[in-house]
């Protein structure tokens, strides 16, 4: 039997949409720089942006 997770233990998800031109640029950048994991790279970009804006994301990083 699977143990039920509490709300605090559940992973928070969100989605984003980007312009087609930005998507093409991102794809070219990833290929040129041999970056294989697109979602991890985008996650890093979002985290860096949140840090730059002064958000505390330390507790979010510790969840995973």
Image (cartoon, rainbow, N blue to C red):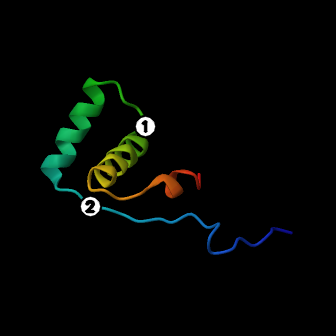
Q: Count neighbours of disc 1 (C-alpha within 10 A) and say few if under 14, some if 14 to 19, many if 20 or more.
A: few
Mark with earlier residue (2, 1): 2
Quick one: which residue is furthest to the right in this view?
1
Q: Where is residue 45 in the image (x, y as percent from the top left)?
A: 32, 45
Position of residue 26 in the picture relative to residue 11 (left or right): left
Mark 1 = which residue? 37
Q: Nearer the viewer, residue 46 or 28?
A: 46
Position of residue 61 in the picture relative to residue 5 (left or right): left
Q: Measuring 25% from the left and 24% from the top, which residue is drawn there?
A: 32
Position of residue 29 in the picture relative to residue 47 (left or right): left
Q: Measuring 16% from the left and 56% from the top, which residue is drawn there?
A: 19
For the residues labelled 2 and 1, say whether their Cβ atoms are less than 8 Å apart: no
Q: Which image quadrant: the N terminus?
A: bottom right
Q: Measuring 26% from the left and 61% from the top, which residue is drawn there?
A: 17
Q: Measuring 65% from the left and 66% from the top, which residue is drawn there?
A: 9
Q: Which of 62 and 10 is in front in this view?
A: 62
Q: Where is residue 31 in the image (x, y as percent from the top left)?
A: 29, 28
Q: Position of residue 23 (x, y in %)?
A: 21, 47
Mark 2 = which residue? 17
Q: Which of 3 and 45 is in front in this view?
A: 45
Instruction: Label 2, secondary structure: give it.
Output: loop
């Amino acid at each position: 039997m699977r143990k039920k997770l509490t709300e605090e233990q559940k992973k928070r998800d969100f989605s984003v949409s980007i312009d087609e031109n930005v998507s093409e640029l991102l794809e070219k950048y990833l290929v040129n720089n041999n970056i294989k994991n697109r979602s991890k790279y985008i996650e890093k970009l979002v985290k860096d942006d949140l840090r730059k804006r002064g958000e505390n994301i330390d507790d979010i990083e510790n969840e995973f």
